[in-house]
Amino acid sequence: MTSAAVSELSVEGKVRLAPPSRVFDRAFKWLTLGMALSVAVLMILVGIGLYHGSRLALDKFGLHFLATSTWDPVREEFGALPFIFGTVASSLIALIIAVPLGVGTAVYLTELAPPRLRQPIVTVVEMLAAVPSVIFGLWGIFVMIPWLRAHLFPWLQKCLGFLPLFQGPIYGVSMLAAGIVIAIMILPIITSVSREILRSVPDLQREAAYGLGATHWEVTRIAVLSYAKRGLFGAVILGLGRALGETMAVTMVIGNRPEIAASLFAPGYSLASVIANEFAEATTDLYLSALFEIGLVLFAVTIVTNILAQLLIVTMAGPKTSRAVQ
Amino acid sequence: MDTSKAYHTWRKLKSLAMSGASFGCALLAIAPLGFVLFYLIKAGAGSLDWRFFTHLPTPVGEVGGGMANAIVGTLVLLGLASLIGVPVGVLGGIYLAEYGAERVNWWIRFGADILNGVPSIVWGIVAYTLVVIPMKGFSAYAGGVALGFMMIPLITRTTEEVLLLVPNGYREAALALGIPRWKMIIRIVAKTALKGIITGVLLAQARIAGETAPLLFTAFGNRFWTHNLKDPIAALPLQIFTYAISPYDDWHRQAWAGALVLILMILFVNIGVRALTRGKLSGVGR
Amino acid sequence: MTVNLTINQKTQATAKAAGPDDHPAVPVTEGFVANGVTVPKIAFEVDRLNGWFGQHQALFDLNLKIPATSVSAIIGPSGCGKSTFLRCLNRMHELVRGARLEGQILLFGENIYAPQIDPTLVRRRVGMVFQKSNPFPTMTIAENVTVGLRLNGVRNHAVLYERMEKALRMAALWDEVKDHLHRPGTSLSGGQQQRLCIARALAVQPEVLLMDEPASALDPLATMKIEELIQELKKEYTIVIVTHNMQQAARCSDHTAFLYMGRLIEFDKTETIFTNPGNKQTEDYVTGRFG
């Protein structure tokens, strides 16, 4: 044995081990705690950053900001109402389309699909979630919009033109187009969260209903869907939260006109879109501050929506299912 | 209750119809991906030549050129973002899984989930405040910070989940050998879960790679090579956006090509990662 | 009979005569002679030990002296606190959230629960083998055995190799794996994995080896091998084994403790416990009147 080897042995041939360092143990624990707390730090950073940047606009316009419709950078009159309208309207349209589709797909996947079909469909839906917003926007501009302008919109106007929703000139870029593209983008998260919620419904519920002679659909309706109501509602709100924040695809198909209109075919503007389009070019401090304030509104709205959604989901099926689709 | 045969048949028909409807929903749900991929390939594949990957953009309006700087720029931004996102996220995830009291952990998890739902453009605004304003200009650093902040809650959660999958028996066995706790966590637990941790990081990177909004006023984009990280830098999704909304047909063509490259990169990582880790996330391969 | 005190034992020999009736009988085995009286060398002296999981008390006022270089078995029905007690001996009980402990345990005379004591050091002296064998999945056989040394600062390859071979021999595994040391630890059979875990524990050169139902997941042949191994190991180590299998306790151990509902009912030579127990409850248990 070499002398180095010998030195590692103490008298009775017992190997000398490095004394454990309690300092290291404690240091590591604090290090990881600090990193974990970064989550809280980030939250505060965002809040403070947005607030600080909005001060000018907040001081100048106050709460009136939320109720004013003018957006005039030249005259420096700013109001967020058109954007709030645009964001809310396009999100609602998206929900109307995506929720039935998403929950329906989730029902199919958990209750009806043959096991071999399940994984491929789940994979496809997850892949859909991986497609970036800008690519949906690209496809939206060059494929979806022309098709809408040439086919779907005129058809809708023909059938339902008596409603103010479907009147007015058709450009293609519109609130409805934005709603459709957002729907495609929030479909995966609604589907996957709904699926987890439905999966967490205990089989006992289903068995009891089958035992009473219920049909497949009745079992689903009575034993599963109504049991999962709260969680499904949470999935919807989660989808809403996502919809509110969608930026690129919306910017590319909504028309970017800061006006409030009754028609779905009319162009609009959303909170995220105006920031995307105008932030880098804001010429005056007040202009920039107004955009900051729009960011603050957007942040506040999405936070509230997400908190609500998480609470609904967590109380139903546990925190694991609240993970957004990665 | 009406127990006649007719009613029973009606119930059965209704059930069948609803089953069909939900199947239809599933079909409609998987259709968009097919559509998008189809058009991407149709409109973009033709433009993917050697030039595209190696040339810089040509002056406005001119035909030709490529997106080399955008592709490289995306990789650079990913690297910068990972410098922030990976250490903070992984260590944070370690804390949540290995230490921590129930209450504190619940709040941190909740916060991370909320942050994961914040619109990405907001991160751009934060990075603008923290980096662009002090540096008086757009830069790769700013873009990296915006994307890095986005990565933190993502990676924290995925790391935590993967670590929790490691069976407790290994922790006990290691501690029973008189191994200090921090060493046990790093050299035994994290090592066992390494594949899963890396998976989480890769998936986060794939997600970040496609983000445009946070870069609009941080990295800002660049028509040339960026030689200094303090300067604005091009990125693939940014370039796609700029070209798509431009009035030039040739730029539209290149936007499709760029989009195809981007989606291939992202899908490649996603599918690859999922295939590699099918059922073996925690490295316990018995 | 005289036994050499090696420098491993950090205590000085105390000429403490065995008190006849202060605890349930302290069996006299090998010991050293002082003042003409043969005294047992005590590995663990458990003194008024009480243990809780949160509000629920699991161990009530345990007092016993576990002799060194012998096998002591802990038996009792499910839920009686056997494993909990075992984990108190190497300070693993406190790792459970909300777990609490009162009293003291002397390991060769040193209170392992003294406030300045680092639990990590205790665990190096008191090794543990678990019910479900758990070789680390990312390591080879060799790496598994030496992990306790490597992660505690030992780098010299010669030393590591020598320790590994010794440990594997002591665990009766060397011949079976010596040509496959680079294979993953998980590639072995169940019984072999458990012996690997024993080797892993022995490599750190503990003074005591705790075993929590080590053979309960193994087939009879593997179980027999483990039991033979225990008989060999007791020549050098103190072994405390928890088992729900009474026959195993009868076969393997020199002394047996019977626990019931968190209390120590009786602790005596195994032979006595199984043939002529002093306590009626013990008798009922070992004769199978309740389980």
Image (spheres, helix red, strand yellow):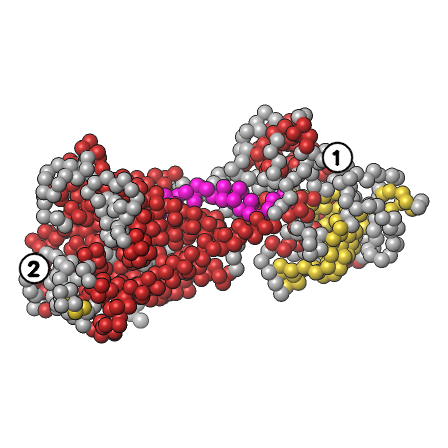
Disc 2 versus disc 1: distance between alpha carbons?
92 Å
Residue type, mark 2 in image: Ile
Residue under label 1, please give it: A12
Residue B133 visible in the shown view: yes
Q: Tell which of B249 and B82 is nearer to you.
A: B82
Where is residue C247 shown, x and y percent of the image? 72, 45
- Mark 2 or 1, nearer chain start: 1
The residue depicted at 72 percent of the width and 35 percent of the height is A10
Residue furthest toward the right? C36
> Is label 2 on the same chain as label 1?
yes
Residue type, mark 1 in image: Glu
Residue under label 2, please give it: A170
Asked if C46 appears above or below C254 in the picture, the reply is below
Image quadrant assignment for residue A235: bottom left
Chain letter of disc 2 in the image:
A
Range of magenta residues? B175-204
Where is residue A95 shown, x and y percent of the image? 24, 62
The residue depicted at 33 percent of the width and 66 percent of the height is A304
Q: Are marks 2 and 1 in contact (CB under 8 Å)?
A: no
Residue C87 visible in the shown view: no
Asked if B8 appears above or below C86 in the picture, the reply is below
The secondary element bearing badge 2 is classed as loop
Q: Tell which of B163 and C283 is nearer to you.
A: B163
The secondary element bearing badge 1 is classed as loop
